[in-house]
Amino acid sequence: MADVNQATVILAPSVGDSEDTLSSQEADQFRQTIANLLLRVDHEAEQLRNKTADLLTQVGELDEVNQSKQVLEALVVQLREANQHLVLATFGAQDLQAKADSANHRQEEFYPCWRMNCAIRWRLSSWLPPC
């Protein structure tokens, strides 16, 4: 953008001038000055439109990032809940494992006694007469 802060002086006839009309050269110069100002205004307006379009694009991108952030935050909450359920399930599984180990230990203690009891009954049944 060229000379944005530069002021352009437009010379117009003052009210007290003796001439009522502009000379042809002055009129052409006046028209040229106005045309240059209009071109500058058009150029600046185009730059503002481009800047506005860029800003709107950035706003759209920021909205997408914000939505992605919200989705990720929701996923983090879900992961935390899932981890909590996994921890509780692990504790439950450990309790069940301890109960199963205890039951297995009692069975291992009981089985030899039961087997011996069966063997004694069988032996006794072969010695005793039937009822």
Image (cartoon, rainbow, N blue to C red):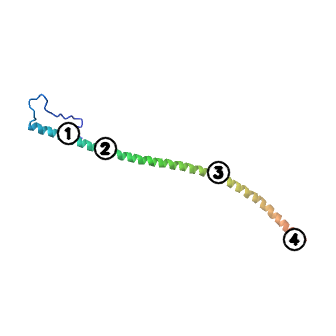
Amino acid bearing label 4: Ser
In front of the other: label 3 or label 1? 1
Callout 3: helix, strand or loop?
A: helix
On the image, the x and y values in percent for residue 68 come to: 45, 49
Tell me the residue that label 4 is attached to. 126
The circle drawn on residue 91 is 3
Q: Earlier in the sequence, mark 2 or mark 3?
A: 2
Across the whole image, how many numbered discs are drawn on residues? 4
Residue appearing at x 69%, y 54% in the figure: 98
In the figure, residue 105 lies in which quadrant? bottom right
Amino acid bearing label 2: Lys
Q: Earlier in the sequence, mark 1 or mark 4?
A: 1
Left or right position of 122 against 47: right
Label 4 to label 2, Cα distance in Å? 108 Å
The 10 Å Cα crowd at callout 1, few under 14, some 14 to 19, many 20 or more, is few
Label 2 to label 1, Cα distance in Å? 21 Å
Q: Earlier in the sequence, mark 3 or mark 1?
A: 1
**Quick one: 97 or 4, which is closer to the camera?**
4
Quadrant for the N terminus in the image: top left
Q: Is residue 59 above or below residue 121?
A: above
Callout 2: helix, strand or loop?
A: helix
In the figure, residue 104 lies in which quadrant? bottom right
Left or right position of 80 against 101: left
Q: Is residue 62 above or below residue 26?
A: below
The 10 Å Cα crowd at callout 4, few under 14, some 14 to 19, many 20 or more, is few
Callout 1: helix, strand or loop?
A: helix
Amino acid bearing label 1: Leu
The circle drawn on residue 12 is none
Tell me the residue that label 1 is attached to. 37
Label 3 to label 1, Cα distance in Å? 80 Å
